[in-house]
Image (cartoon, grey):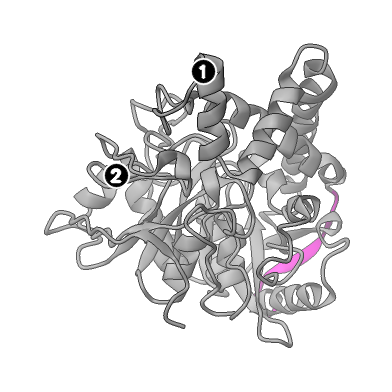
Amino acid sequence: MTDYNGYIATETIEGEEDGPLAGRTVAVKDNISTEGVQTTCGSAMLEGYVPPYDATVVERLKEAGATIPGKTNMDEFGMGTTTETSAYGPVENPVAEGRVPGGSSGGSAAVVAAGDADMALGSDTGGSIRCPAAFCGVVGIKPTYGLVSRYGLVAYANSLEQIGPIAPSVEEAAELLEVIAGPDERDGTTRDASEEVEGYDFADAADGDVDGLSIGVPTELLDGADEQVVETFWTALDDLEAQGATYHEVDLPSVEHAVEAYYVIAMSEASSNLARFDGVRYGQSGGYEGNWNESFANSREEGFGEEVKRRVLLGTYALSAGYHDKYYKKAQDARAWVKQDFDEALSEADVLASPTMPVPPMKRGESLDDPLTMYLADANTTPVNLANLPAISVPAGETDEGLPVGLQLVGPAFGERTIIRAGSALA
C-alpha cells in the first residue's frame, strides 16, 4: 500500500545531534504543538495555524536527538475511533486493506505499522492510543495521568487525556516513554513520580520475565466481544501462563456504566475547551456578515465537522442549567465507582487483562452512520481513563481473516514498569 494518508504534513523537524533517540524518527500527532510547523488537529478550523512554541514532549524529543518526519493524521480534535472524521480525509489501515486503523491516533499507528516512522506519539482520551495500536498490530502505551506533560497538547478533555508512545515493540515504546515522561512546571497536573517508576527507567523493565506475575481477567470486558477476538485473547493468556504467569477472574461491576460516564464527562469538557474556537481567538475568521453571534456561529459551522458538532452540543446540554446534576454529576459519581473497582481488582492481581478492542478493525465507512456503535467500541478502553491508570496494548495475534487483535494490560497508578514487563513477554 502506498497511499494510506497517515501524514497531514511531512515537514521535517531536526533534533539535536546526540541523545538516546539520535538517528531515529518519531512522528507526532497533529494535536501536539510544533513551533513553526502547522498544527491542525485534523480540523478545517485550524488549517494554517502555526504554533509559536513547542509542546513539552516535542522539546524532549528534540533534546533526545529524534527527528520528527511529520505530523500525523487524526480524528478531528481527537473525536473518533476510526480516524475517518479528519478534515484531511480518512486513514486506511496499512496492514488490513479496506479497514480503519483505529482512532483517534490512527495516523500515528499507521505510519509506524507501515514503517514510515520508527516510533510515534499519540494522545489517549478514551483509548485513542491503544485502539489504533491494536488495529494496526503495534504497541501503544497510555501512561498514568500526570506522568507525561500535556503542555502544548490541544485540549479535548483535560481530566482524561494523556500523551503516550506508539512503537513496533514494547522495548521501543518504553524507550520513547523514558524520553517524554517526567514533571513539568508548565503543567500543574504532572508530578514527580521518579520513586514509583524507578527514575523513569522503563526500557530495562521490558525483559519478558513474567514468572510469578498474577493477571486478573475482568469477565465484564469479554461480554459481547467478537468470538475470534475472545479466542485470540485466551490464546495469548495461555502463552503468558506457559511463561510462568497465572490468571484468574476478577470483578469490575461498574464498567457497565463506564462508557456512558466517559462520554458525558468527555463531551462536557470538550464543550468548554472548544469554546475558544470562535473565529476571534482561534479558528476561521473574516468574511462573515452579521453581528458577533452570527459570525461566531458561521465560523464554527464551517470549521467543525459533524462529529465535533455532535459532541459539543451534547456536552453543552449536559452542563446546562437543570441538567448538570442529572448527567454530569452522576457521571462523576460513576467515575469514582470505576476507580474504586479498579483499585480493588488490582489488590488481587499485579495487572488486569482484556482484549484492547472488542472487535477487529472495522471496514471503512462502517460506523460513520452509526455513532452509537462507534462509542460502544470503546467499552474496554474508556474505564482506564476514568480511573487515570496506565495501560498498554500489545499484539495478541490475528483473526482467521488475518486482522490484528490487541491485548490490553492495565496496572496500578504509576505501574508502567509492571505493564511493560508483562507486555514484553508477547511483543
Q: Where residue 406 appears, x then y in whole percent?
A: 64, 69
Q: Is residue 56 above or below residue 15?
A: above
Pinpoint residue 245: horizontal percent, then vertical percent.
Answer: 68, 69
Q: Is residue 58 left or right of residue 373?
A: left
Residue designated by label 2: 34
Residue 72 falls in which quadrant of the image?
bottom left
Q: Which percent across, then down, holds residue 20?
A: 24, 59
Q: Is residue 410 magenta?
A: no
User: Circle 1: is it few (<14), some (14-19), or many (20+) Cα within 10 Å?
Assistant: few
Q: In the image shown, does 185 or 283 lie closer to the viewer? A: 283
Q: Is residue 35 left or right of residue 373?
A: left
**Which residue range is magenta in the image?**
242-251
- Mark 1 falls on what kind of element? loop
User: Element type at marker 2?
Assistant: loop
Q: Is residue 410 above or below residue 117?
A: above
Residue 245 belongs to magenta span: yes
* Amino acid on which disc 1 is placed: Gly
Q: What is the CA distance from the residue labelled 2 to the residue labelled 1? A: 35 Å
User: Nearest the camera: 101 or 228?
Assistant: 101
Q: How far across and down, in percent of the image, does residue 225 sit? A: 83, 66
Task: Examine the rendered structure and indicate whether residue 91 appears above or below residue 220.
Answer: below
Residue at 71 percent of width and 72 percent of height: 360
Q: Which residue is mark 1?
A: 290
Give the number of the disc on residue 1. none
